[in-house]
Structure formats: structure tokens, C-alpha cells
Amino acid sequence: MTDVKALQQERIKIYHDIYDNRIPKRVPVDINLTFEFQTLSAGLNLSEVMWNPSLIEDAVDKICQTVYSDKCPFGGTQRYPSFYQILKSQSFKQASNGFIQHPEVAGMLPEDYDYLIEKPYDCILERIIPRQYKAFNLEDPVNTAISFTKSILAYQNDNAQVEVIINKMVEKYGYSPGGRYTGGITSAPFDFLADQLRGFKGISMDIRRMPEKVAAACDALYPIVFKRGLPAQISNYGDVFIPLHMPTFMREKDFAKLWWPSFKRMVDEYASMGIHCRIFCEDDWTRYLDYLYELPTNTRIMFEYGDPKLIKEKLGKKHIIMGMYPIMSMKTKSKEECVDEVKRYIDILAPGGKYIFGFDKSPLFFTDVKMECLCEVTETVRNYAVYSNSGETAGMKFNKEDYKAKPSRKLESKYYKTWEQYKAVNPEVSDFGREKLQNLEETLFKYITSLLI
């Protein structure tokens, strides 16, 4: 047990050193193996385990024994079938093989733009969610209330089962504590509009036909996605996770005009509060590297594709670089070839610090990687990516005073009440209920918005 605790303290320190602008003892190995991968690796029935997440514990334990990582390699999933089924989701459906599929379904029509811009949260609840979730039927309020209640209970139960497993693994194997999404998770305003509101086809047409309304909608949605990502506690070691979807499908002039402004404003406002962002740049962001440089210092940037040398040269002194090592290599190459390749990545990305090792994406099927190559790669990083100058200053330092929040709309809706608004219509309520009632309001808000992320 003493050895496990000592290892955990080492792991905590190497992460903290990176976030505190110091060269760590070694590069952290940050591996995330999906719920699906770990289930299938144990020969379990994916459909059954998705409905009963506690069944995955032994499979996770075996992975933790087998694969080296400084962070728990299991983070659960955001997409359990229980609450989607209860709400009759149109955009997330479980296939017969157990995987959750995401068909292209638009919850928002072009004629909804004006109402979305005027009253975004009202529009989401009155129009968009009822289209995406058929059990949310405004003409059948009693069954809607029952279905909604069952769905949030299922959501909380599934996540609680997984949280228990993660905490057990952290304690047993001495991982750096904290789940992968415990700090916060949200979407860029444009991506929130594009993903489940308008859909890819819809937003592509809107960019050409009504760009002004797209821009106005991003401004209207800003307070919703900003609030959704706020962590319960602000820490230099936590972050808000934001996967970035649409930019590589856009022309740069559209990106600069419609996508970037609201996103940049959001990360700057987080930075002004001392909140860091961990963004996942899906696909190849090479043409946007100069934009990424302008993000707040120490933004944690996960890359899928790109030239590691160019990324290091442009961003390595200001931001923390993650990702990029291709999982395909661990499927198609020998152990020796994988070792040589990962050493090349380390030689490029590790010097000067501000680097956390990770893959370009997480494997989904057990056949996506050869286990012996996976183990060899992670152990090579642990043993090879060691610094001789640990403790020295690494690159630029973050200072929240460098960032200012720009004025933006407040979240105003008859479906969301602050304590003061609730107290005004319920003057008899005790002030002792303030924290509990406000927390319930926030829990519902985060659950509702999670249905569209």
C-alpha cells in the first residue's frame, strides 16, 4: 500500500508540475480506453453491460493491471442507453450490437432561429428537445414528467456506478485522482448549434443562406454553454473539456467570422476566472494553429492529426500539448516499430515540458489495437520520456489577470430560476433551503443541456 501511495504522489506531482509551468520528472502517460473497448476486451456482452455498468468492474481491473497509465484508463461514457431509451431519443439509439449510434437528426428548424435568438433556453425546452426526445411531449404533461424523472434517475444511477469503479481503481492502483470529465464539459457555441440543433446539413446551408442569424444564435447560446461548462470548484489542476467538431469542415473565412469569436470569448472568460480548458481538436487543425496560439496560456490541447514538429514549434512554449500518437500503429505495426515511433514523438514533443502523452483517439473495438503493442508503447513512454532538468521553468506562465470577460447576455428563462427569483415567488421558503434548491436547479440545467451535447 505504501508503494501505491508513493506512486500516486509521484503521479500527482508530474501533472501538477506541468500545470504549474515546471519541467516534471517524466512525461505523464494519459491513456483513455473506452467503455466499449474494455467491455469487449473481457468478452462481455456490450448491450448488457451498457445497461448495467457495474458489470464492467472486473474488466476495468484487468486493464489497470495490464496497461500502464498515470491517469485511470477508464472514464466510463457519456452515453448510456437507459436515459436515451426512457426519453425516446431520436439522435442517440442503441444498436443490436450494443453500440450507441448517432443518426443525423435536426431538432431545430430554420424558422426557429428568431425564437432561439430571442429566448434560447425556452426554445430548447419547448421546441428542440421535444423533437429530439419524443417522450418529452408537451401535450402529455403527466407522462412527460414521469419519463423525465425516470430518465434523470437512470442517468444519475449509471454515472454513480461508474464513479464507484473509477474511485476503486484510483485507490487500488495509485492513479492521479479525478475523473476525466469531473471538472466540466461543454461545447463551443457554434458546435452546440450545429451538432443536434441544426445538424451538419442544416448548419452548412445556414452558413450560406443566413450567416447573420447563425452569428446571432451563437451569441444567444453563449450563456448556456458557458454556464454548462463551469466546474463546481476552480483549480489550476482542473479543466473544462470541450471537444471541437465543426472547424475542419468549414472554410477559414466562415470559421473566422462565425465559429471562432464566440469560442474565443468563452475560453477567455473562463481564463479570467482562473479556469483552464482542455480542448480536443478533431481531425487536422494545421490551418488553424495560429488561431490556437491566441488561446489563453496553458490551454490543454489534444490533437487528433497534424505534424508534431510544427505543432511543437508553434504552440509548445505557450500551451500544453496532448494526443497525436496514432492508435492505428498499434494495430498494424510490430512492437519494435511502435517503440521506435513513440520515441520519435517523445523526442519532438517532450523537450521543454508542457507535454502529456496520449493517443490521437481512443480505441473503440478490442481489435483496434494489439494489446502487446499498447502495453509496450505506454511502458516505453514511462521509461524513456524522463527529464534530466526536472524542476526548471517550462515556457510561458498563465496569469488570469491577462484576460477579461466581454459583456454577454445573461441566462434568462421562465424555466430557470436563481435563488432570488425563486424566493420572490415563494417568500415563505427558509433561507436554509437556498443551497439545496439552487443545487437542484443547477443539476437539472446540466442534465437538460447534456441531452444536446
Image (cartoon, rainbow, N blue to C red):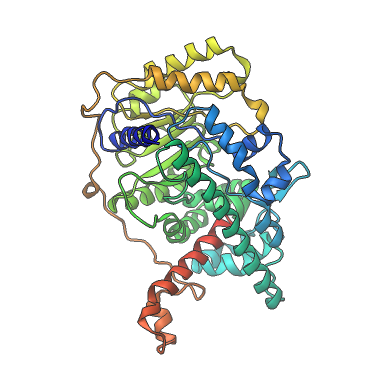
At a point 36% along the width and 26% down the height, the residue shown is: 27
Image quarter of the N terminus: top left
At a point 52% along the width and 73% down the height, the residue shown is: 415
343 in relation to 10, above or below: above
> What x and y, as percent, mark residue 222?
44, 57
Quadrant in the picture for residue 237: top left
Q: How many callouts does the rendering have?
A: 0
429 in relation to 58, above or below: below
Quadrant in the picture for residue 343: top left
Q: Is residue 315 visible?
A: yes
> What x and y, as percent, mark residue 284?
51, 29
At a point 57% along the width and 49% down the height, the residue shown is: 78
Please give left or right for residue 139 compared with residue 420 in the image: right
Quadrant in the picture for residue 170: top left
> What x and y, as percent, mark residue 8?
37, 36
> What x and y, as percent, mark residue 168?
50, 44
396 in relation to 346, above or below: below
Which is more toward the observer, 145 or 131? 145
At a point 58% along the width and 46% down the height, the residue shown is: 77
Q: Is residue 362 visible?
A: no
Which is more toward the observer, 115 or 425? 425
Q: Residue furthest front?
A: 1
Q: Residue furthest right?
A: 96
